[in-house]
């Protein structure tokens, strides 16, 4: 099973940026589980996988994505709506590609125990950009394992790594957040203020969240 085959089955175009991340191994957790367990700290600080700075996001492979689709997020259970999961939260919520009203591939979190969710960003690239800005504005979640200085470097490493995959306008917006960095934005848990983050989001085209009904995971396959 591959993401290409899952995308074809779902009728959701696989974003080229996501395809490149997969091809470059940027969603992998070390060479194997043992490698990750031994070296997770170094990998995280070096932005491996990409978005290692993000809160509560774990990339999944195509096999895991296929299991989520088969057991929960498939049109048969979800009123005809198709999903392409690519990451999960610690609670089992799924980050998914979905078709927007305009026919593009947007991204949203599908909550495993709620009866509705929303497409929150207009594209996969916008999702990556948003995750990076949110991490710069609040990296408190990283402080369980790293110092404040290390957390800042983790965010910066992810911004540098993302530059090879994001369009120029989003890279310019990220550069503006840190060069020059405003001293008054700095704190023990953030590189930028929430106001600076909101200003950075101005580079994104307006997108109204698209809400939709969800059948919670525990209700699927009943009987």
Image: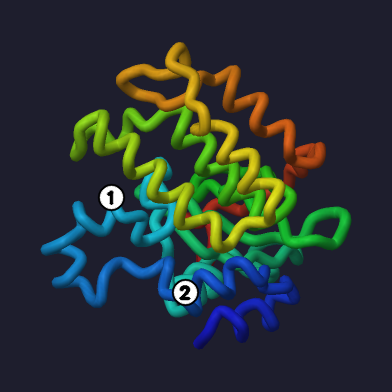
In the drawing, what numbered circle is on residue 201? none
Across and down, in percent, residue 196 comes to 59, 22
Mark sitting on residue 45: 1
Q: Residue furthest top?
A: 184
Q: Position of residue 9 (x, y in %)?
A: 68, 82
23 and 9: which one is in front? 23
Residue 18 vs residue 155: left or right?
right
Name the spot of residue 50 as percent of width and height, x first.
Answer: 43, 58
| Coloring applied to the structure | rainbow
Residue 95, image quadrant: bottom right
Q: From what the image shows, is residue 69 above or below residue 122?
A: below
Of residue 218 and residue 165, the one placed in the foreground of this image is: 165
**Residue picked out by circle 2:** 67
Give the answer, above or below, for where 178 lies relative to 113: above
Q: Residue at x 46, y 51 (%)?
A: 160
Residue neighbourhood size for the residue with mark 2, other residues' Cα within 10 Å, grouped as few (<14), some (14–19), many (≥20): few
Q: Dot 1 lies on which element?
A: helix
Does residue 89 show up?
no
Q: Residue at x 20, y 65 (%)?
A: 36
Tell which of 4 and 148 is nearer to you.
148
Q: Secondary structure at mark 2?
A: helix
In this orientation, does residue 9 appear? yes
Query: Disc 2 versus disc 1: distance between alpha carbons?
Result: 30 Å
Left or right: residue 144 compared with residue 142: left
Q: Residue furthest front?
A: 180
Quadrant in which residue 70 is drawn: bottom right
């Amino acid at each position: 099973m591959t993401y290409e085959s899952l995308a074809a089955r779902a009728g959701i175009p696989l974003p080229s940026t996501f395809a490149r991340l997969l091809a470059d191994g940027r969603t992998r957790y070390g060479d194997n589980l043992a490698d990750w367990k031994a070296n997770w700290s170094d990998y995280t600080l070096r932005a491996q996988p990409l978005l290692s700075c993000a809160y509560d996001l774990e990339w999944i492979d195509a096999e895991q994505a296929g299991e989520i689709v088969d057991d929960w997020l498939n049109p048969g259970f979800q009123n005809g709506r198709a999903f392409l999961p690519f990451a999960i939260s610690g609670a089992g919520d799924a980050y998914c590609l979905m078709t927007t009203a305009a026919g593009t591939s947007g991204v949203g979190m599908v909550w495993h125990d709620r009866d509705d969710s929303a497409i929150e960003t207009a594209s996969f690239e916008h999702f990556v950009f948003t995750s990076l800005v949110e991490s710069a504005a609040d990296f408190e979640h990283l402080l369980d394992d790293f110092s404040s200085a290390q957390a800042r470097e983790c965010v910066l490493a992810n911004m540098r790594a993302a530059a090879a995959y994001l369009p120029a306008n989003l890279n310019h917006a990220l550069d503006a957040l840190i060069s020059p960095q405003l001293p008054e934005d700095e704190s023990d848990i953030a590189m930028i203020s929430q106001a600076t983050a909101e200003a950075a989001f101005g580079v994104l085209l307006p997108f109204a969240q698209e809400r939709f009904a969800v059948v919670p995971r525990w209700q699927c396959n009943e009987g």
